[in-house]
Image (spheres, rainbow, N blue to C red):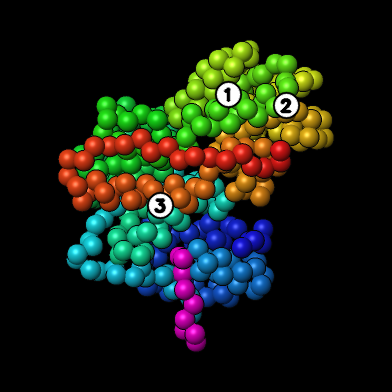
Amino acid sequence: MKLPEKAKKMVAYLREQICIGAYHHGAKLPSIRDLQEQFSISYTSAIRGIDYLCSAGLAEKRPRSGVYVKTPRGTGKSANGYKIALFISGEKLCEIHSIYSTVFLGIQRIAEENGYSLSMNCLPVSEATADRIADIGQGADGVIFLSEYDASIKKLPVVVPSVGVCMHSSFSGRLSIVDIDPYLSAELAVEYFLGKKVDQLLVVSKKDIPPAYRNREEVFACLWRQSGGKLKRVNLSDGMKLCDRTGYFFPTSSLLQTCSENILETTGKILADQAVVLGIDGKNLINPEFHNAPAIALDWQIAGKTAIEECLYRIKNPGSLPKRIYLPGRLAGKL
């Protein structure tokens, strides 16, 4: 469902308030008139924003009564009374078309179907510490991290079964990992660039890139060299000059988008129209504001479903070992 530009701020705000519990299950949301005034939008935009929340399973309309936060089926059943604490950077949750909001929808649907309680905790990666995570996660039966928290914490501060999405460190084998398969992605990327017959290849990165993305770089670089190719690493902050017959590999599509925006400012054209490029994870296929470009993409709702299923399995089976669960991506976008 396409969301009007003017309704995005409203939907992002309501989604965050629902997920952090400011509007609890069964609570009535503000009226359409109040939402119009609060966000300075039209009646039509407010209605379509509410329709979007309903289609995402967060809200429901009750005839002649109003709009309410949707109550998961089975809520309150002690037999299924598991509490899962989710950690996510607040700004990522508010991004309507982000990977993590898409992952959350996959998690939410499993929780709704089974009556599991989700506790959403907005904690920016830059502010995450082991002590803060331990304090917030108290009382949870399991924990799911929906941001690259291994970029800031060096030890896993919880003892309950835990799963990280788009993380790389397993914290000495205590954290299960769910991510796009870096090995299959690298194989697809090598095949793609060989098919384009590029003479040289640049891996575009940045100094503070999270561990999972750095791993994608390293796996791709290894397979590219095994194929007989040569490559050079460049830092995004150093700027880029486009070269003929050159391929550009990005370990995440968000880096590709940043680079493409920079190129657009200087040339008036997006990067994918001028060079052979490829990004991993497919953020550009989720967010309509991203430039169209080739990507190795994943269905991130499936990643969310996989994350909560892995967390629940470990809760129900004490002593079960954490896993690295790599999901296959596919070549998509503007090829």
Label 3 neighbour load within 10 Å: few <14, some 14-19, many 20+: some
Which residues fall within the magenta stretch?
57-65
x, y (%) of residue 86? 35, 49
- Compared with 231, 156 (above or below) is below
- Earlier in the chain: of badge 2 and badge 1, it is 2
In magenta stretch: residue 64? yes
x, y (%) of residue 176? 32, 38
- Compared with 193, 44 (above or below) is below
Residue found at the very far right of the displayed protein: 268
Identify which amino acid the numbered label 2 is placed on: Lys
x, y (%) of residue 87? 37, 45
The kind of secondary structure element at disc 2 is helix
Residue marked by disc 3: 305
Q: Which marked residue is nearer to the observer: mark 3 or mark 1?
A: 3
Residue marked by disc 2: 196
Label 1 neighbour load within 10 Å: few <14, some 14-19, many 20+: many
Res. 149 in view: no
The CA distance from mark 3 to mark 1 is 29 Å
- Compared with 98, 244 (above or below) is above
Q: Residue at x 63, y 27 (%)?
A: 191
